[in-house]
Image (cartoon, grey):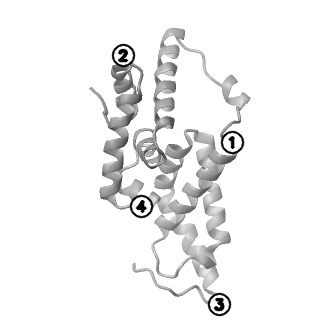
């Protein structure tokens, strides 16, 4: 569908609400995957997806009749995640610290160290690379999905991903690259180091 400059007219709001509801069910898996990528938290990802839908329903009058719905919803979702990250960047959730399951301490420790090193390294990336790398490695989003949700051309996403992964390799502590490759390859199909 081509975007138009028309806004919904009288009575169109109810039709748009119905369309939003049915379309939301169709794009829910994509939105959930993106939410997990940008939040790194399953429960919060679910909350953001729900909030995205509520905001979309509340602001349906701002949606251009005939425009594609998925990019609009992805934009709302990414903005919510950014706002949450900004508001809670220094908060420690005590419940999450106590909720871990007990397993082999050495395996758990090693996996946690690798994950923390990867997270710290991703956090050190410049913003334009950080979101792209996190969405690809952690959220397993495709290039198309990342480009759509961040409203950037696919070629830009590919370049940012390549440069971001290169910088990520250089940021990882020495001797951790192989463990990081195993960790990432066990959670996603992208292998970023050798």
Q: Using the image, determine if residue 15 lies above or below residue 72.
A: below
Label 1: element kind: loop
Label 4 crowd bin: few (<14), some (14–19), many (20+), radius 10 Å: some
Label 4: element kind: helix
**To which residue does mark 4 refer?**
148
**To which residue does mark 3 refer?**
10
Label 2: element kind: loop
Residue 27 place in picture, x, y as percent? 48, 60
User: Is mark 2 in CB contact (under 8 Å) with mark 3?
Assistant: no
Residue 15 place in picture, x, y as percent? 59, 81
Mark 3 or mark 1, earlier in chain:
3
Front label number (3 vs 4) = 4
The label on residue 88 is 1
**To which residue does mark 2 refer?**
175
Q: Residue at x 31, y 43 (%)?
A: 162
The residues tagged by marks 2 and 1 sit, at their Cα atoms, a distance apart of 32 Å
Front label number (3 vs 1) = 1
Q: Using the image, determine if residue 65 lies above or below residue 117.
A: below
User: Is mark 3 in CB contact (under 8 Å) with mark 1?
Assistant: no
Q: Is residue 94 left or right of residue 46?
A: right
Mark 2 or mark 1, earlier in chain:
1
> Which quarter of the image is occupied by the C terminus?
top left
């Amino acid at each position: 569908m081509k975007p138009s400059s028309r806004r919904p007219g009288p009575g169109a709001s109810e039709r748009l609400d119905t369309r939003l509801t049915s379309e939301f069910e169709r794009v829910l898996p994509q939105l959930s995957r993106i939410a997990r990528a940008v939040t790194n938290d399953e429960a919060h990802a679910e909350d953001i997806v729900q909030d995205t839908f509520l905001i979309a329903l509340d602001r349906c009058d701002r949606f251009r009749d005939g425009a594609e719905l998925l990019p609009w919803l992805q934009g709302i979702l990414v903005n919510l995640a950014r706002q949450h990250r900004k508001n809670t960047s220094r908060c420690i959730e005590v419940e999450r610290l106590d909720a871990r399951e007990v397993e082999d301490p050495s395996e758990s420790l090693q996996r946690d160290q690798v994950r923390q090193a990867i997270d710290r390294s991703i956090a050190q990336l410049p913003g334009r690379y950080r979101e792209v790398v996190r969405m690809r490695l952690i959220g397993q989003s495709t290039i198309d999905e990342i480009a759509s949700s961040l409203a950037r051309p696919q070629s830009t996403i590919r370049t940012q991903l390549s440069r971001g992964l290169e910088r990520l390799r250089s940021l990882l502590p020495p001797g951790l690259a192989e463990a990081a490759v195993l960790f990432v390859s066990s959670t996603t199909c992208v292998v970023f180091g050798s």
